[in-house]
Amino acid sequence: MIDDSEVEQNFSSEGKAIMNRLETMGFPGETVIEAICVCDGDEERSIEYLYDNGYEL
């Protein structure tokens, strides 16, 4: 499990904002972090990644 201190250290303020928006949409936190990392911080690609990997809202 990823804790808040790891997120603080590894995400920019923009990355944290993306993470918050995706979690607000209903995606699980750890999968959101995975998607953002895999997609190099691109929000639209992260959403596509989540849907393509079976994470439905």
Image (tube, rainbow, N blue to C red):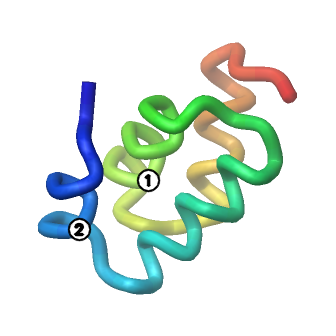
Residue 7's label in the rendered image is none
Query: Dot 2 lies on which element?
Result: helix
Q: Locate residue 38, reporting x and y percent.
A: 35, 45
Q: Locate residue 9, reporting x and y percent.
A: 13, 68
- Residue displayed at 39% across by 85% down: 13
First in residue order: circle 2 vs circle 1: 2
Q: Identity of the amino acid at label 2?
A: Glu
Q: Locate residue 12, reporting x and y percent.
A: 31, 80
Q: Identity of the amino acid at label 1?
A: Ile
Along the viewing direction, whichever of 23 and 48 lies nearer the viewer: 23
The answer to whether the residue labelled 2 contacts the one labelled 1, judged by CB atoms less than 8 Å apart, is: no
Q: In what quadrant of the picture does the N terminus appear?
A: top left
- Residue displayed at 43% across by 32% down: 30
Q: Is residue 6 above or below residue 31?
A: below
> For mark 2, what is the residue?
8
Picture mark count: 2
The picture quadrant where one finds residue 18 is bottom right
Q: Could you give the CA–CA distance between mark 2 and mark 1, rounded to whole angstroms?
A: 14 Å
- Residue displayed at 43% across by 53% down: 36
Q: Is residue 30 above or below residue 38?
A: above
> For mark 1, what is the residue?
36
Q: Are there few (<14), some (14-19), or many (20+) residues within 10 Å of tag 2?
A: few
